[in-house]
Amino acid sequence: MQSSARRTGVMTDVHRRFLQLLMTHGVLEEQDIQRLQKHCYMVHDRNATVEKLEDFINNINSVLESLYIEVKKGVTEDNGRPIYALVNLATTPVSKMASDFAENELDLFRKALELIVDSESGFASSTNILNLVDQLKGKKMKKKEAEQVLQKFVQNKWLIEKEGEFTLHSRAILEMEQYIRETYPDSVKMCNICHSLLIQPFSFQGQSCETCGIRMHLPCMAKYFQSSPEPHCPHCNDYWPHEIPEVFNQEKEKEREEAGFSKSSKKSLRSRQQ
Ligand SMILES: [Zn+2]
Ligand SMILES: [Zn+2]
């Protein structure tokens, strides 16, 4: 019996291996996280009962707490699937980025972040970002250089570019949630259900009420509306006109996976990690 593995705050080799592998991947989708967990059990504790993923991660987080590190769950920006990342709660993203970027580049990121958080759509156009180049702290930057720096942010998974507009990468949202809440308390937008950050309300991340403007993540909303035949906004009670997504079903996903349908999602994960 591996009862110690199930006690909160006690990490075994299974948890440690899991953490190490998650660190090397940075960010993983839920089905890959489950595969990873299974793999770690196979390697270190073949006979133990596989802990429920949520308990397994809570257990790890209770140990990491004192280090201001956490395994956080979020959703991908392109299809709303659950993802997990190891995030550092102690450092602000800007200090974390400081080793890779110069002062004026970091300030460009702050300006872009501010535009993104302030916008209704969660996107900032490159034109609007580049218009602020003259106000940057530190060394003077030309617009051409700024364009290249923005691309560097995309490569480093801080930003995503879609048709000349920039938004936050889902990994960045996970990493920066705390920072964004503290820095932009008035303009930050939250999901009405889980109360965590929701940057893009018109995407695979979430939807927004046309009447009162509240936002909900797709997975949160799917669960919330699951049993209501006529969806109404939980805030203003107006009719919810948008299409309600299906609840993400872990069991169904597993079946698909076992039937060999997981290749495409693995591919998309890999392409995101480039
Ligand atoms: Zn939510
Ligand atoms: Zn409403």
Image: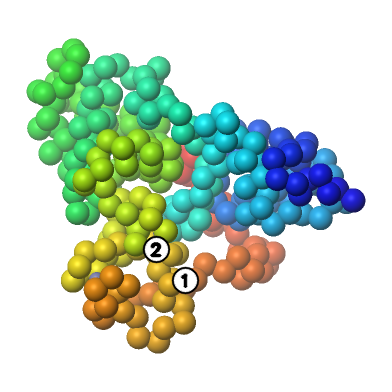
Q: CA gap, disc 1 to disc 2?
A: 10 Å
Residue at 30%, 51% in the rendered image: 199
Q: In the figure, 203 relative to 32: above or below?
A: below
Residue at 66%, 53% in the rendered image: 55
Q: State the residue position of label 1.
A: 223
Of residues 205 and 236, which is closer to you in this image?
Answer: 236
Residues under numbered marks 1 and 2 in contact, where contact means CB atoms less than 8 Å apart? yes
Residue 94 visible, this angle: yes
Amino acid bearing label 1: Lys
Tell me the quarter of the picture where residue 231 sits.
bottom left
Q: Residue furthest top?
A: 139
**Horizontal and vertical percent for residue 240?**
28, 77
Mark 1 falls on what kind of element? helix
Decide if residue 132 is on the left or right side of residue 1. left
Decide if residue 8 is on the left or right side of residue 23. right
Pointer 1: residues within 10 angstroms few (<14), some, or many (20+)? some
Q: Does the residue labelled 2 lie within 8 Å of ligand 1?
A: yes
Disc marking residue 193: 2
